[in-house]
Structures are given as C-alpha cells and as structure tokens.
Image (tube, rainbow, N blue to C red):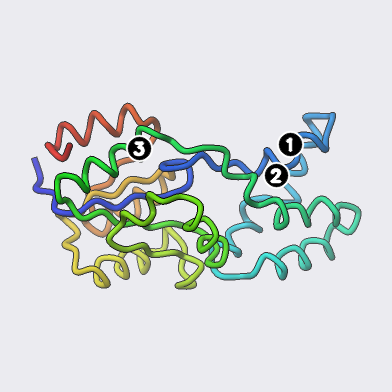
Amino acid sequence: MKKISAVIFDVGNVLVKWDPRVIYEKHFEDKTELDWFMDTVVNMDWHKHHDAGRTFEEGVRIRSEKFPDYADLIKLYHTQWDDTITGVIQQSVDCLRALKAKGIPVYGLTNFNGPQFDRFRQQFDFIGLMDGVVVSGDEGIIKPDPAIYHLILERYGLKAEETYFIDDGLPNIVAARAEGIVGHHFTSPEGLVKELKDFGLI
C-alpha cells in the first residue's frame, strides 16, 4: 500500500452535483430537441473554453452569433449558472472534513471558470477547508493537460507518488496517473469512502 501524504479533490460531480441541463429542461417539451441543444449549442466543447479562462459574456456572444435563434437560451447559461449546482455530495464533503481532522493536507483541482469559482467559493464553506485550490480558469490550463498536474504538485510542494487525486472524469485520472499521481476514478461516494478507508486515510 502506497503512503499518501496529501489528497486532491475535483469539485464538480465529486463534492457537488453539477448539471447544466437543469437550466433548460423547462424550456423544451421535446426531450430529443433538448438533447440536440445540449449536444450541439451549449456543449462541453464550447464550455471548456470558459474553464480555460474565456469569460461567460464572451462565450455567450460567440455562441449566439453561431446560433442566433437560440440567443436568449444561450444567455441563460451565464445568468442562471448558479442553478447548475444542484446539491452537495455530502459523503464526499464528509470525507474532506475527516481527512482534515486527521491532519492530512487537502487541495482542490478543478476545471472551473475563475470568476464563477469565486462566487462558488463564497457559497460553499468546505472550500475554505482546503489548503489550496488550483482553478483552471485562473491558470489558462484545463485537465487533462499534464501541465496542470505539474502546477499543483510544484505550487504546494507535493510528491506525485504520495498524492491521492479524486476526479469523476476518467481521462483526468488517466492523465494524473501518467504523472505518477495515485488516481481514484470517482463513480460513487461509497466507493470513495471504501478506498480512503483501505488506504487508512479516514
């Protein structure tokens, strides 16, 4: 069993539930049309530019020029952003608190727009428990770019082989493991609790 001296949490769909689809469900009676809208108009290829630092205002403008018939709906992606956070994943947050109680340093590594994360930070007090957070939008680098893993390790003086990283995105875990980090692909809080116990961390 590897020695773990620090834990890094992803945020969206690890500590909180995140789903931009909830903004639009009430605007589409036809599920097929909603699926098309989410896959084509406000898709993740477009959204990842916000995570890399593009402002939401700029993103909305660019997308509205491409899909002018949906401009009013695209704007909601910005104005109703808070609604995309649909709840806390309490068992994961409890894990974070348990790790801190045992004196284990805890960090955050999240693909998140910088200004939006500043708002998010004020709404969820458990972010304040972290010993440091790397936000992709502030750095201009998004997971799974290896550079963002190097950045967090170097910034906080972490050893890759002693760092445990939790993320719901499998490509992000694969990339972290390639840098020597111990990766946990988050699929359920129960699975996370079990593995943290197996490592003797909680």
Pick the front one: 44 or 158:
158
Amino acid type, callout 1: Asp
Tell me the CA gap for discs 2 and 1. Answer: 6 Å
Residue at the image point whose x is 23% and y is 49% from the top: 164
Query: Within 10 angstroms of label 2, few (less than 14), some, or many (20 or more) residues?
Result: few
Of the residues under marks 3 and 1, which one precedes in the sequence? 1
Closer to viewer: mark 3 or mark 1: 3
Indicate the quadrant where residue 78 lies. Answer: bottom right
Marks 1 and 3: in contact by CB < 8 Å?
no
Counting from the top left corner in percent of width and height, residue 153 is at 25, 66
Tell me the CA gap for discs 2 and 3. Answer: 29 Å
Residue hosting label 1: 35
In the picture, the quarter occupied by the N terminus is top left
Residue at the image point whose x is 32% and y is 45% from the top: 166
SS of the residue under disc 1: helix
Residue at the image point whose x is 29% and y is 68% from the top: 150
Amino acid type, callout 3: Ser
Counting from the top left corner in percent of width and height, residue 57 is at 72, 68
Amino acid type, callout 2: Asp
Marks 1 and 2: in contact by CB < 8 Å?
yes
Residue 24 lies, with reference to residue 63, above or below; the image says above
SS of the residue under disc 2: helix
Residue hosting label 3: 92
Query: Within 10 angstroms of label 1, few (less than 14), some, or many (20 or more) residues?
Result: some
Closer to viewer: mark 2 or mark 3: 3
Residue hosting label 2: 39
Counting from the top left corner in percent of width and height, residue 10 is at 39, 50
Counting from the top left corner in percent of width and height, residue 141 is at 46, 68
Residue at the image point whose x is 27% and y is 43% from the top: 97
